[in-house]
Image: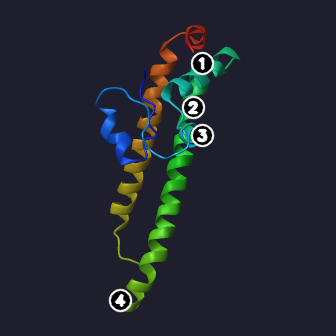
Amino acid sequence: MSWAGCGRCWACWRWRWRAPAPCRCPWPTSRRTARRRPRSSERRRDLALLRVVGALPGQVRSMAAWEAGIVAATALSLGTGVALATLAPMLTAAFGSWVPYLPWPTALGMAGATLLLALLATGLPARAALRRRAITTLAAS
């Protein structure tokens, strides 16, 4: 019997590392399977499928890089907007201006580091997934 906990309650987390047992919590079974994250094997399968339909490895890596860049830019813009919205009243009351003081090199360095981390976190797994033959990856899944 494998572990079938929901991962949401203390009982599931506590019993997870002991002998395999079914979930002891009141969460219904449908909620356990409805919200699951995509696994790296599913991403590997998607990249292999792109390779099978004719995409070159460079095109797949470029697509992954663009995806990471768009996600990082969206995160930076939304994070900056939320931070300014929450800090604006306090800054206006304390300093008379809603614009916080942040040196440009620091802001650009943080944005660049965020973009670099996003590119590495997407590019390295994509590169590793492209090392295997696409047909082998699709046959395994």
Residue identified by numbered label 3 = 30
- What is the distance, in whole Å, between disc 2 and disc 4 at their CAs? 45 Å
Disc 2 or 4, which lies upstream in sequence? Answer: 2
Disc 2 or 1, which lies upstream in sequence? Answer: 1
Quarter where residue 116 is shown: top left
Q: Nearer the viewer, mark 1 or mark 4?
A: 1
Element class at badge 2: helix
Disc 3 or 1, which lies upstream in sequence? Answer: 3
Say the numbered circle drawn on residue 62: 2
Disc 2 or 3, which lies upstream in sequence? Answer: 3
Q: Nearer the viewer, mark 3 or mark 1?
A: 3
Which residue is painted at 57% across and 39% down in the image? 66
Q: Position of residue 90 (x, y in %)?
A: 39, 84
- What is the distance, in whole Å, between disc 3 and disc 1 at their CAs? 30 Å
Neighbour class for label 2 at 10 Å: few (<14), some, many (≥20)?
Answer: few
- What is the distance, in whole Å, between disc 1 and disc 4 at their CAs? 55 Å
User: Which residue sits furthest right?
Assistant: 53
- What is the distance, in whole Å, between disc 2 and disc 3 at their CAs? 37 Å
Neighbour class for label 1 at 10 Å: few (<14), some, many (≥20)?
Answer: many
Neighbour class for label 4 at 10 Å: few (<14), some, many (≥20)?
Answer: few
Q: Position of residue 6 (x, y in %)?
A: 46, 40
Residue identified by numbered label 1 = 48
Q: Position of residue 46 (x, y in %)?
A: 61, 25
Element class at badge 4: helix
Whether 20 is drawn above or below 117: the answer is above
Element class at badge 1: helix
User: Is the residue under label 3 in contact with that under label 2 (CB below 8 Å)?
Assistant: no
Element class at badge 3: helix
Residue identified by numbered label 4 = 95
